[in-house]
Amino acid sequence: MEDKVLNILERLELRFTSMENKIGGIEAKINGIENKISGIEEDVKELKQDVKELKEGQERIEKKLESTHEQVERTAEDITSIKHDLNNVEMITSKNWYDIAKIKAIK
């Protein structure tokens, strides 16, 4: 009977040892997973910072674009005004040439 009990105890000890080894392996895997998660969290943090910087850059670009658009509008208005003035100069010059030709014809 003692041999039987001893045999059972030895098998239990082997099972416990096996379970301890498996638990050790599981702990190692969990540590590995935790390390990977920490790395992922750091990557996410960096990505969030990058996105924030990109948004700030985009806002600066939008402000510059708006300013440029306003300058282009003013320039277009100036060009239209210059064209109008140039047309007036051409008409006045034409009239002056006509008046000069008329004066020459009278002489």
Image (cartoon, grey):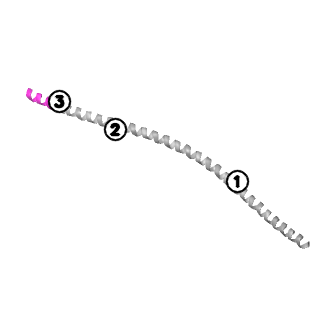
Specify the amino acid type for callout 2: Ile
- Disc 1 crowd, CA 10 A, few/some/many (<14, 14-19, 20+): few
Residue 47 visible in this rendered orientation of the protein: yes
Toward the right, the furthest residue is 107
Q: Main secondary structure of the magenta part?
A: helix
Residue bearing mark 2: 33
Q: Nearer the viewer, mark 3 or mark 2?
A: 2
Q: In the image, residue 28 lies at what x, y percent?
A: 29, 35
Residue at image point 23% right, 33% down: 21
Disc nearer the start of the sequence (3/1): 3
Residues in magenta, as a range: 1-11
Q: Quadrant of residue 55?
A: top right
Circles 3 and 1, Cβ within 8 Å, touching? The answer is: no
Q: In the depicted view, which residue is nearer to us: 13 or 35? A: 35
Residue bearing mark 3: 13
Query: In what quadrant of the picture does the N terminus appear?
Result: top left
Left or right: 54 as drawn, with respect to 5? right
Left or right: 60 as drawn, with respect to 26? right
